[in-house]
Amino acid sequence: MGNIILLGAPGSGKGTQSEKIIAQFGYNHVSTGDIIRDNIRNNTAKGNLAKKYSEQGKLVPDDLMIEMLEDYLQTVQGGIIWDGFPRTVNQAEKLDELLAKRNAKVDHTLYFEIAESKLIDRIMGRLICPTCKRTYHITFHPPKVAGICDYDQTPLVRRADDTAEKVQVRLAEYKRDTEPLVQYYLNKQNLSVIDADMEGDAVWNQIVAIIK
Ligand code: AP5
Ligand code: MG
């Protein structure tokens, strides 16, 4: 089992498709957004430093992000879905190093291409489970019981950075720092473009065709 990067704008469906890949193929999920939110929730020193960036929609500085990631990776073995990391060219180079130490490499980079006009509706309707991290949407993917996680019955919450104003900040950060990674992974010849505009199983079917 290898390493698959999910690259795409905020709200493009990285977390949603991660859940499906893990359920079907059994990878580990490394979501740096979840790692940061857990650090904040648990009041760790690193979480307190990261909070002022992530809750405003700004990228957490590379050094702090990499420290939190390395703490988390100590417990992870086997194939990984990288959801939200790397997000800068510096992080991409760090990932190459981390994987080399594990005798591994990036096998696929799935680039979620999506029209910007779709992102606001997706993000503003999102609900997440703070316990198991599963993602819902009030219209497109509602839980069976309103406001409650299907799997562990935890009350669902909205993310602190899911406001119209902060989405604009997140998008600007994405365009400036993360979009250049499309070219970085094109050069490495492992990039596949996923049409993430689609609904239902259409996004999933494209992914399965590549990673099966
Ligand atoms: P992070 O948690 O990674 O957020 P993000 O990149 O902004 O992406 P999202 O989680 O918002 O979107 P997603 O692509 O996962 O979409 P989802 O599947 O939920 O990062 C948060 C913050 O942490 C960053 O802003 C930064 O501050 C910090 N951070 C994280 N990583 C960092 C790093 N490496 N370096 C520095 N800082 C870092 O889908 C969205 C909604 O749409 C859901 O409600 C879903 O149900 C719905 N939906 C999904 N697919 C479809 C579909 N096909 N049709 C209809 N609805 C759909
Ligand atoms: Mg996500």
Image (tube, grey):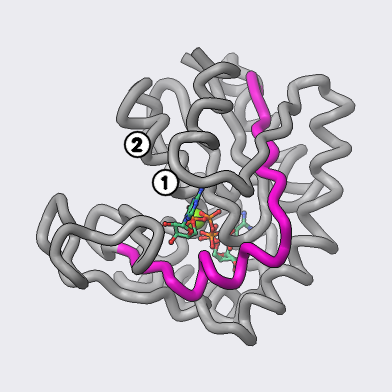
Residue type beneath disc 1? Tyr
Is 177 displayed left or right of 19 in the figure?
right
Residue neighbourhood size for the residue with mark 1, other residues' Cα within 10 Å, grouped as few (<14), some (14–19), many (≥20): few
**Residue 40 screen position, x and y as percent:** 39, 73
State whether residue 132 appears in this view: yes
Q: Residue at x 64, y 19 (%)?
A: 107
Residue type beneath disc 2? Thr
Compute the Cα span from label 2 to label 1: 6 Å
- Looking at this rendering, what residue extends furthest in the bottom direction? 165
State whether residue 43 appears in this view: no
Foreground pick, 17 / 94: 17
Under circle 2, the secondary element is loop
Is 75 displayed left or right of 1 in the figure?
left
Instruction: Answer whether labels 2 and 1 touch (C-beta < 8 Å).
Output: yes
**Residue 46 screen position, x and y as percent:** 48, 68
Q: Is residue 181 above or below residue 58?
A: above
**Residue 24 screen position, x and y as percent:** 33, 24
Q: Is residue 68 above or below residue 200?
A: below
Q: State which quadrant residue 11 falls in.
A: bottom right
Residue range highlighted in magenta = 106-128
Foreground pick, 120 / 28: 120
Q: Disc 2, ligand 1: is the CB inside 8 Å? A: no
Q: State which quadrant residue 58 falls in.
A: bottom right
Residue neighbourhood size for the residue with mark 2, other residues' Cα within 10 Å, grouped as few (<14), some (14–19), many (≥20): few
* Residue linked to disc 2: 75
* Residue linked to disc 1: 72
